[in-house]
């Protein structure tokens, strides 16, 4: 005897499979890669969070395909934050959630879909200028990986700027630091909000200087190889959120509470 509601459940499952299949096709079209390789893309999604920490609405960029947007939005709405507070009371807030959508090939010639939390915080504007590559470093074919510490002010400007090497054992030329700081003084962001009011957020931002034919010392090569191994080990642990390489909020008013990686196999 069929249990009540079984037909509705199967209908919902069929709809999910159809939507996920369309999302995978859209992802394949939007992220060029070779067949049977993992495809991934980072999306930055505006999120309205209520006083209980639940995401009630999302906002995606206009250029995100509708099929992908619906899947990512549905996944993000399953996540939960520790509520923001004002005067000791939980209040609504707004942040930007960074998500990674990854299509992973399976043994049957298809793909499974994984959506992971990469961080949240203010959103840097796309039109921000890139740091200028120092000419002394270009001549020497040198690369650098810089971390910028900054505060996104309520008006969207950046203040309290400082920069340093991403790796403790990789000293940088002062020209790299100067280039990042000069660019950052002109950068703007969309700040987070608490109870409808913009707030300041302390951030880590990364800036990478790389060339087509770089020259690395043996020590630098070892540093990069060790970092790659550590990243691979971290990413092998499902459900553990990783901060974005581009932005990391240090004191966001919204802290993630339940943001497990979501996996679907259409």
Image: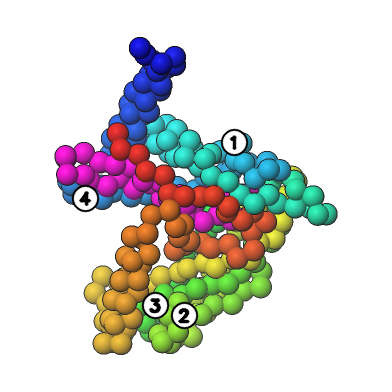
Looking at the rendered structure, the secondary structure element under dot 3 is strand
- Distance between the alpha carbons at the discs numbered 2 and 3: 8 Å
Identify whether 19 is placed above or below 42. Answer: above
- Residue designated by label 1: 57
Q: Marks 1 and 4: CB-CB under 8 Å?
A: no
Marker disc for residue 165: 2
**Residue 157 is a magenta residue:** no
* Quadrant of the image containing the C terminus: top left
Question: Of tags 2 and 3, which is closer to the observer?
Answer: 2
Q: Is residue 15 visible?
A: no
Tell which tag, 2 or 4, sits nearer the viewer: 4
Percent position (x, y) of residue 47?
59, 43
Q: Secondary structure at mark 1?
A: strand
User: Which residue position holds label 3?
Assistant: 144
Q: Which mark is residue 37?
A: 4
The magenta region covers: 94-122
- Relative image position of residue 95 (x, y in whole percent): 61, 49
Magenta region, main secondary structure: strand
The residue under the point 44% across, 14% down is 4
Look at the picture and state if 13 lies above or below 114.
above
Few, some or many residues within 10 Å of mark 1 (<14, 14–19, 20+): some
Which marked residue is nearer to the observer: mark 3 or mark 1?
Answer: 1
């Amino acid at each position: 005897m069929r249990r009540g509601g079984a037909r509705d459940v199967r209908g919902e499952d069929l709809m999910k499979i159809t939507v996920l299949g369309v999302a995978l096709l859209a992802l394949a079209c939007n992220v060029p890669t070779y067949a049977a390789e993992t495809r991934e893309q980072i999306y930055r999604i505006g999120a309205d969070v209520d006083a209980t920490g639940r995401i009630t609405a999302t906002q995606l960029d206009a250029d995100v395909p509708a099929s992908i947007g619906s899947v990512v939005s549905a996944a993000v709405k399953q996540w939960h934050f520790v509520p923001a507070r004002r005067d000791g009371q939980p209040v609504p807030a707004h942040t930007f959630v960074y998500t990674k959508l990854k299509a992973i090939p399976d043994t049957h010639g298809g793909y499974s879909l994984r959506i992971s939390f990469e961080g949240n915080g203010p959103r840097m504007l796309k039109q921000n200028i890139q740091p200028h590559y120092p000419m002394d470093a270009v001549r020497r074919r040198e690369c650098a990986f810089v971390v910028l510490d900054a505060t996104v002010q309520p008006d969207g400007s950046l203040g309290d700027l400082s920069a340093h090497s991403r790796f403790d054992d990789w000293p940088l030329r002062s020209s790299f630091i100067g280039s990042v700081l000069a660019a950052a003084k002109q950068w703007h962001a969309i700040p987070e909000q608490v109870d409808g009011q913009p707030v300041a957020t302390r951030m880590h931002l990364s800036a990478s200087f790389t060339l087509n034919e770089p020259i690395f010392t043996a020590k630098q090569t070892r540093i990069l190889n060790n970092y790659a191994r550590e990243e691979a080990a971290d990413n092998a642990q499902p459900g553990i959120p990783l901060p974005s390489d581009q932005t990391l909020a240090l004191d966001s008013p919204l802290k993630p509470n339940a943001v497990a990686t979501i996996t679907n196999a259409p």
